[in-house]
Amino acid sequence: MDQGTRWQGPKRGSRSRSVLASVAVAAVLGAAGCDTVGGDEAAPSGPGAKKAAPAPSPPPVWDTSPASVAAVGDSITTGFDACAVLTDCPEVSWATGGSEQVDSLAVRLLGPAGAAERSWNYAVTGARMADLPGQMARAVGRRPELVAVMAGANDACRATTSAMTPVADFRADFEEAIRTLRKALPKAQVYVASVPDLKQLWSQGRTSAMGKQVWKLGICPSMLNDPDALDAAANERRETVRSRVEDYNKALEEVCAEDDRCRSDGGAVYEYRFGTAQLSRWDWFHPSVDGQARLAEIAYRTVTAAKP
């Protein structure tokens, strides 16, 4: 630029065309609905923003208030020796009994009237795990919403330790019982109680002279024979029984864990320290009425827990 030439700025026509082009671009962008939010960023929030509807919560797999209860198992669930010597007393059963002293699982869940109408006990004194599939088959005929299971003590309570049920057979029989239930009632729930610590029962009951006399009639000989013997062989025999019970409980818990509608007590019954007040005053081995009430408490706590 020489000194004699004055700068005139852009020509009017050029500036007008630039303004019109900018307006046109803005109009196109507005018509396309574009905003300044990138594709990976959240849209702006505010009173005018639409909120996504929350996803519906899936129904809980476990119902803490089932409407009916069936029980399967052995002499503990029949209330054996709780009311009279060598006699079943289902009225005080921890699972389905109507006794106010026990406040059974069924009564706690259904109320006294509901328990009388919608709970059933298929347990049999002397039953072993091999008997459970048959009991389960009878129980499903009632279409219960919850089945309470306590079995296994008689598998360990044999004439000798070598006669105890092998763990593999015990597991297979329990699995068959669960399959029997699932085939008929795929949504029924199962509560599984652990097998009590039979050695702890021996240590309490051996303080009773009467109890030891009743034991001679054949109650759990693998554990209770020669109750006062403390030699190496006797101690080894009792430890063998206790170890087998622990293996049974592990099998129960593992099989139950594979089923979304099964809850085990996590070893609560096994770990419960039964005192003399919780043992039958006739055989000092089976649960007394008070012992049955303690079993009902454990069961109810497990069934109604918010989470397993």
Image (spheres, rainbow, N blue to C red):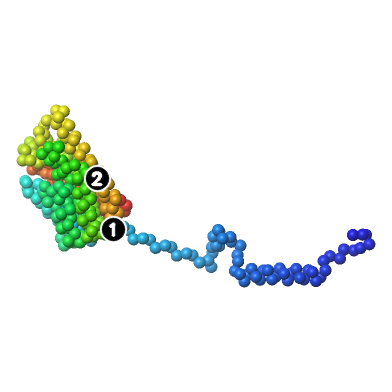
Q: Residues within 10 Å of mark 2 (few under 14, many from 20)?
A: many
Pick whichever of labels 2 and 1 is earlier in the sequence: 1
Q: SS of the residue at dot 1?
A: loop
According to the picture, the residue beneath numbered tag 1 turns out to be: 63
x then y, percent, for residue 110? 21, 59
x then y, percent, for residue 60? 32, 58
x then y, percent, for residue 187? 26, 59
For the point 19% across and 49% down, which residue is it? 173
Residue contact at pointers 2 and 1, CB within 8 angstroms: no
Tell me the mark number nearer the camera, choosing from 2 and 1.
Answer: 2
Say what amino acid the circle numbered 1 marks. Answer: Asp
Q: Nearer the viewer, residue 163 or 288?
A: 163
Say what amino acid the circle numbered 2 marks. Answer: Ala
- Checking the image for residue 251, the label placed there is 2
Q: SS of the residue at dot 2?
A: helix
Q: Nearer the viewer, residue 132 or 107?
A: 132
